[in-house]
Amino acid sequence: MKKVGIPQGLFYYYYYPLWEAFFRFLGLVVVRSSPTNKKIVDDGVTLAVDEACFPIKVYYGHVNELKGKGVDYIFLPRLVSIEPKSYICPKFMGLPDMIRAGIKDLPEVIDITVDLSRGDKGWQKELARLGKILNVNYRQIKKAYNYALEEYFSYRMIARQGYTRDEAIKVWQGEEISLPLDTPLHIGVLGHGYSLYDDFISMSVIKKLRGMGVKVYLSEHLPTEGIEKEASTLPKRVFWTLGRKMVGSALYMDKSPDIDGIIYVACFGCGPDSLIGEVIERKVKKPFMLLTLDEHTGEGGIITRLEAFCDMLARRKKRDEGYLPCYG
Amino acid sequence: MICYLGVDIGSVSSNFVLVDQRGKVREKIYLRTQGNPVKAIREGYMKIKEGIEGKIDIRGVGTTGSGRHLASILLGADIVKNEITAHAVAASYLYPDVRTIIEIGGQDSKIIIMENGIVTDFAMNTVCAAGTGSFLDQQAARLNIPIEDFGRKAVASSQPVRIAGRCGVFAESDMIHKQQMGYPVEDILMGLCEALVRNYMNNVAKGKRIAEPVVFQGGVAANIGLRKAFEKFLGCRVIVPEHYNVMGAIGAAILAKEYVEGYGRRSLFKGDDFILTGDFVSQSFTCNGCANLCEVVCIKRDDTPLAYWGDRCLRWESSLGRGSRENLKVV
Ligand code: SF4
Ligand code: SF4
C-alpha cells in the first residue's frame, strides 16, 4: 500500500478529516507528522525563507519530518480560495513551490490547487489531475471525495459541540474526550486555527485558560449564519475568508450575553492578523486583549497577561453581581 | 504583631513588605535579585523579620512577579498573583479613585486603566528596553552620572534636548551626538526623560485614554525628572506613592490579607524552620522524554523535589502527585 504524508500544520486543523478520509477511501495509508515540537520548529525556522510568518516556518519543519518517514507522496495543497469571491492569505499560493525550493529530495508532491473562488469548474479538473497522479479513475475519485465530505461534516459537527479543532479531530478518530465543564468565567478566543490549536505555537493558550477555570468559546462553536451576518455589517466586505470569520465571530461574541471578554491570538509577522486585530479592537465593546506570539515570546509574559485578563473579568463580574470586592 | 507578608520577585529586584492588620506598611526591603532568586527570597525574608522589633506572627503570604511561583514554593503562599493585578490592588488600596497607573520597572513597563477600583484595561511591554529603567541606567552610566542624581540634575534643565526615543540603540547614538555638539548635560538628561516618556506613550500606552488621578510607580518613579516629563506630556499632576518601589509586594500582601480574612483560612505559610534551615537548590535539566526536549527546572529542598517548571506535558510536575499549581485558579 502506498503512503501519503500530511504535515500537521496550517490547514491540517481545518481539513485533516477530509483529506484522511479521501486517501483512506482510495486505499492509501495516511502518515502524519508529529504534533509540533521543538525540533520541528527549529528545522522549520532554518529551512524557511526569512519573510515567512511563523506558522509557515513551522510547516516547513513538518514537511521535513515527513521526508524521513518513508512516504510515497507528500500532500501539500495549494489553497487559494475555499468559497466564492473570498481568498485565503496570499502566502499559501506559492507555498508548494517555495517548499520544493527549500527542502531537497522530497517524495512526489501532491500539490493540487484548491480555488473555489469562481465556482466548481476548475476544482473538478484538479480532482481529475489528482486521479492521474494517484493512478485512479475519475469515478473512484468522485466517490472518495463524496465520502470524505461526509466525514468532514461529521467532524465539523463534533467541533461545534465545544471542542477545539485538535480535540475534535481526536474525537472524530474515536478517542473519548470529555467536554470541559462550565465555569463562571466565559472568554471568547479568536485566531488562526493553525496557531490557536497548535499547542506549541499558541503555548497552549486555550489549555492555560481552562486551567485558570475559564470556559473557552471559539469561532467553531458559533452558528455560521450568525458570524456571516455580523461580518456583513462592516462597511467593506472582507474578501479574505479567515479574517472575515474572525471579525464576524468577534462581533457575535460581543453581543452574546454569556461571554465576558474576548482574546485575539495573533502571530507576529502576520499582516492580516495585525489588520484584523485592529478592526476587532475598534469594534468590540467588551474587554478585549490582543495577544501576539512569536518565536521569542516568553511564556511567563503570556501567562501574566492571561491571568491579569481573567482577574479583571472575574472582579468586574463580582462587582456587577453586587458582591463585596474580594481579592481572590 | 500580626502581619501579612507580600513578596514581589522580579528579574532585577526582589521586594518584600510586611503590612499589619490595618493594612499599613510596617517594613519594606528592596534587594537586587542578581540572577539568584532562591537566595534573594531567603535573604529578603530574614532581613524583613530583623527590621521588626518583637515577635511577629505571619498570618498570610502573597507572592507576585516573574518569580512568584518559586517564592510561593519556598515561603508557602496563600495567594499567587500576576504583577498587573498586584500593582492595581496596591494603587487602588492607597488611592481608591485612581484611574491610571503607570508602572516602570527595571525590565518591563505597564499601564493599567482603572474604574471604580476595577481594572478595565492594561498593557505591558517586556520586549523593548527603551521604555524601561535599564535604559536610563545605561545612559546615566554613559554620562558618568550616578543614577540617584539623574532626576535632580535633569529638572535643572531649562531647554531639554530632543532625543530620538524609538529604540534604545538610536537613542544612545543620538544622545552621544548631542553630547558632542556641546549641549549642557542637564538638558540631555531631561531630553532622555522626555524620550522615555514618548516611547512609553507610543508603545505601552498606545490608544489608551489617560484619566486623572494618575499614579506613577515602580523603581524608576524615584526619578523626579521622569515624573516632571510625564506631567508635561500629560498636562496633569502625577502622583508618586511613598512606597513607589515596592507596590507589587504591597498588592500581594493586601491580597493575601483579604483572602485569608475573607475566607477565614489558615495560612499556608511554611515558617522559619522550613524556610531558613533547609538547603534549597534549583537545578535545570533537559528532558529526553520526547522531541520537545524541554528545559525543566526543579526546585529541591535537601534533595526532595518541591516543584517542577518548564515541562510542556506536565509529566514532571504531575509526578509530584498533586496539583501544585492549584492556587492559580482565578475563579
Ligand atoms: S494569514 Fe498570517 S499567519 Fe496565516 S499564512 Fe498568512 S501571514 Fe501567515
Ligand atoms: S517534559 Fe514532556 S513534553 Fe517536555 S520533553 Fe519531556 S516528555 Fe517531552
Image: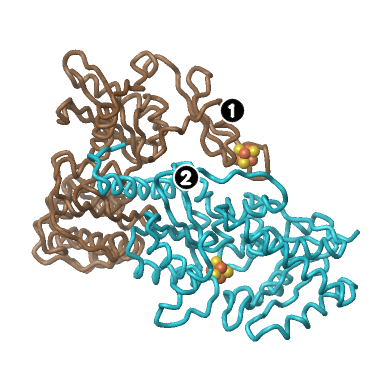
Chain colours: A cyan, B brown
Q: What residue is disc 1 on? A: B319
- Point out the image quarter for the N terminus of chain A: bottom right
Q: Is residue A226 left or right of residue A304?
A: right
Identify residue type, mark 1: Ser
- For the point 18% across and 40% down, which residue is it? B93
Helix, strand or loop at disc 2? loop
- CB contact under 8 Å: marks 2 and 1: no
Report helix, strand or loop for mark 1. helix
What number is the disc on residue A182?
Answer: 2
Where is residue B10, by image quadrant? top left
Quarter of the C terminus of chain A within the rendering: top left
Labels 2, 1: front one:
2
Q: Is residue A209 left or right of residue A324?
A: right
Q: Mark 1, chain letter?
A: B
Q: Give x and y (percent) for residue A307.
A: 39, 45
Label 2 is found on which chain of the structure?
A
Residue drawn at 38 percent across, 30 percent down: B71
